[in-house]
Image (cartoon, rainbow, N blue to C red):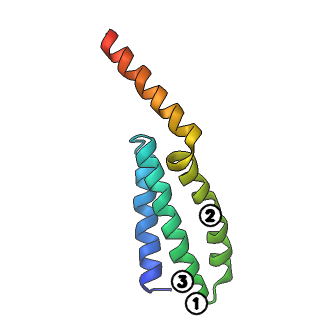
Amino acid sequence: MNGPFAWFGAIGAIIAAGMIAADLGRRWTGWGFALFVAVSVAWIASGLLHETMPIVVQNALLLAINAWGVWQYLLSPTKKRQIKKQEELAEQAKNEV
């Protein structure tokens, strides 16, 4: 497992984890999850090519979790409304100070 899928998976996972850990806001976190989705797909491909089923199973489950993260942070209409309201309140508080 030293091919391009594995390298993309390894490097992408480091970058995605850094994006989420940096806590730069919901949008950055959402894009971190989107990168994790791509990483999971790469690891699944690598696992299938090299017949390492534990990697395939693990990343199939992580793919579902990461896709849920993308939904929560980037796509959910309810979350988008909450974010908009939070931004409005933050701007209001900033103007009051």
Direction from residue 93 to residue 78 in the image, left or right: right
Badge 3 vs badge 1, beta-carbon distance below 8 Å: yes
Give the image location of residue 52, x and y in percent.
63, 85
Direction from residue 57 to residue 50 in the image, left or right: left
Give the image location of residue 45, x and y in percent.
55, 82
Location of residue 73 with respect to 66 vertically, above or below: above
| Residue holding disc 3 | 46
Q: Residue at x 44, y 54 (%)?
A: 31
Location of residue 91 with respect to 65 vertically, above or below: above
The numbered disc on residue 75 is none
Direction from residue 51 to residue 21 in the image, left or right: left
Amino acid under label 3?
Ser
* Residue lying farthest to the bottom in this orientation: 50
Amino acid under label 1?
His
Amino acid under label 2?
Leu
Q: Nearer the viewer, residue 79 or 6?
A: 79
Q: Residue at x 31, y 14 (%)?
A: 95
Residue 50, by quadrant, is bottom right
Question: Nearer the N terminus, badge 3 or badge 2?
Answer: 3
The numbered disc on residue 50 is 1
> Which image quadrant: the C terminus?
top left
Give the image location of residue 37, x and y in percent.
53, 64
Q: Secondary structure at mark 1?
A: loop
Q: Secondary structure at mark 3?
A: helix
Give the image location of residue 81, x and y in percent.
52, 34
| Residue holding disc 2 | 62
Question: Nearer the N terminus, badge 1 or badge 2?
Answer: 1
Q: Report the Cα–Cα distance between label 1 and label 2.
A: 19 Å
Q: Residues within 10 Å of mark 3 (few under 14, many from 20)?
A: many
